Amino acid sequence: MIPFLELKRQHEFLKKEIDNAINKVIKNSHFILGEEKKLFEQEFAEYCGKKYGIGINSGTDALILALHSLNIKRKEEIIVPVNTAIPTIMAIRAIGSIPRLIDVNENYLIDSKKIEPVINKKTKVIMPVHLYGKVCDMDKIIEIAKKHNLKVIEDCCQAHGAEYKGKKVPIGEIGCFSFYPSKNLGALGDGGMIITNNERIKEKLILLSNYGQEDKYNARIFGINSRLDELQAAILRIKLKYLEEFNKKRRENAKKYNELLSEVKGVIIPDYEEGHVYHLYVIRHKKRYELINYLKEKEILTQIHYPIPIHLQEAFSYLKYRKGDFPNAEKFSNEILSLPMFPELTDKELRKVCEEINNFNNIVA
């Protein structure tokens, strides 16, 4: 069996270090707002080339609190791509704001050319999503934001270590990360972080994530309970040391996939870029479901990210979008397929995946 993702391999490699980190936390018995969280916040912020990190309960909470930190209100609009994970949009809905959806380009990312036409008096934030480990056209997005006095919050939940013109994300003032176990940098549970260079926003986020309390029993502002715990922070500190190595292996795998699939008819492969971190390796094929079933018969597991565009989800029907409003996203949703991709994927396994895709094409041709 070739798994889509195999976390056991990574955890077996890191087991001794992770065990020691967990035992250290248990020995200290300081499980919330302790030294491990503080150190990981510093280390991950430095890794991203920014000043401040605020450890949060999840990537979704990171987006929610980032919006709160900018005082975004109900009924105000957030520009966001239609091709994204449901949590991105749920974060906007959670604060009562309105997602203003934008179609995507050939790289599955927000089409920066389509942003300005939907900006209106209610627009407050542009939320680009660095999907699949690819980075959006940030120069253009930041230019548009400055022109219209808008804020930018980057959803970096699939882009740990991804680079844009030599700089790691986030490129703008605020970036939100998830440490869900399957991410390039994953915890052994939920976790997230907001990265910023803005000290005022950092101070507000600290309050927002801890009941609004400046100190115990003294709440200054609205806040919730959303704190990265010590066990997850300690584990993530271990994994952070290996993130560059893991991302390098992902890039190597992506390059091999491209080489082996470039001549296979019917398969559309992603562009290869050194700055991308290939959280997912996504191809397109017009006979996707037939290919999925064929690969499954050959004991090769795949996934679809994402089969139903946001505007066609029942939960977002209130936005009044219709089928046909976002042609690129709709087309891609019928063709995209994520192949096995993780640092420990072997050359033999990768070649087997490509061999069977080629065999499938020969059968259906």
Image: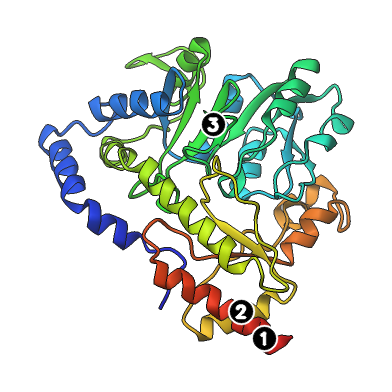
Is residue 321 toward the left or the right of residue 130 in the image? right
Relative image position of residue 94 (x, y in whole percent): 62, 38
Residue at the (67%, 81%) spot, across then down: 361
Residue 33 occupies quadrant = top left
Relative image position of residue 163 (x, y in whole percent): 54, 35
Mark seen at residue 169: 3
| Pointer 1 residue | 362
Amino acid type shown at disc 2: Asn
User: Which is nearer the eye, 28 or 297?
Assistant: 297
Mark seen at residue 120: none
Q: CA distance from mark 1 to mark 2?
A: 6 Å
Relative image position of residue 198 (x, y in whole percent): 52, 13
Amino acid type shown at disc 3: Val
Is residue 339 toward the left or the right of residue 183 in the image? right
Mark seen at residue 358: 2
Q: Secondary structure at mark 3?
A: loop
Frontmost of labels 3 and 1 is 1
Q: Quadrant of the C terminus?
A: bottom right
Amino acid type shown at disc 1: Asn
User: Which is nearer the eye, 65 or 48?
Assistant: 48
User: Which is nearer the eye, 331 or 203?
Assistant: 331
Answer whether labels 1 and 2 touch (C-beta < 8 Å): yes
Q: Is residue 3 visible?
A: no
Residue that sits furthest to the bottom in the current view: 363
Q: Residues within 10 Å of mark 1 (few under 14, many from 20)?
A: few
User: Which is nearer the eye, 178 or 245?
Assistant: 245
Relative image position of residue 342 (x, y in whole percent): 43, 58
